[in-house]
Amino acid sequence: MPVTLHKVGKAEWERDTQLALDLSRIYADVPAERLPLPADDYIRDQLERQGIFCCARFNDRLLGAVAMNVVDEAWWLSNMCVRQTTRRRGVASRLVTLICQEAYRDDYLLRVAASTLLLGDELLLKRMGFKLVADGEHYELDPKASLGGKG
C-alpha cells in the first residue's frame, strides 16, 4: 500500500472538508478512553493549540493519523490511530517511517509520552527503534542514529 505523509494544520483542516471528514473518521475509531476529549473536540483542540496531524494518505484519503506538537528540539507524537478498515496492513509502521525521515531531514528528535501507551503501541515503537529514556517518562528516537546517517 503506497502511503504518503500528509501534514494537516488548522488552515487546511478548515479549508478542506474531505480532510476534516477523514480525520473525524480516523479518530471515531479510537476507543473513547484513549482520547482526552471526544474525537471531534480532540481534533479541534489539537489544531487550536497550534498542533498538527501527521497523516497517512492513500488514494486522496487519510487512513491514519498521529498528533504532533513541536517542543524545543523534539516532535512529540501522541494518539496514533489507523482506520479500523485498514489496520494490520502496515499503515502505522509506514507513517512512523515517513515521520522519521522528515524528522531526520529537519534535525528533530521524536518523542512519545510513555504514560499514554498501550502494549501494542509500545511494541510498535520498540520495533521502529524507539528507546525508553532513563527516567521512563517517554520513548525517544533519534532519526540520525536510526537511519544510520541516511535520509
Image (tube, rainbow, N blue to C red):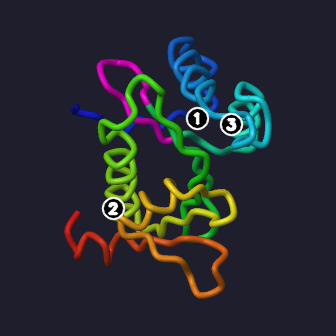
Q: Are marks 1 and 3 in contact (CB under 8 Å)?
A: yes
- For mark 2, give the secondary structure: helix
The residue tagged 1 is 9
Q: Position of residue 80 (x, y in %)?
A: 54, 44
- Measured along the vertical axis of the image, is residue 40 above or below residue 21? below
Where does the C terminus fall, quadrant-wise?
bottom left
Q: Quadrant of the N terminus?
A: top left
What is the CA distance from the residue labelled 1 to the residue labelled 3? 6 Å
Tell me which amino acid carries mark 1: Gly
* Secondary element at tag 1: loop
Label 2 packing within 10 angstroms: few (<14), some (14-19), many (20+): few
Total of numbered circles in the picture? 3
Q: In the image, which residues are magenta?
A: 54-63
- Residue ID for mark 3: 47
70 versus 143 height, above or below:
above
- First in residue order: circle 1 vs circle 3: 1
Other residues around mark 1 within 10 Å, as few (<14) / some (14–19) / many (≥20): some
Q: Residue at x 32, y 74 (%)?
A: 144
* Cα–Cα span, label 2 and label 3: 24 Å
Q: Is residue 55 magenta?
A: yes
Report the side of 24 relative to 94 (left or right): right
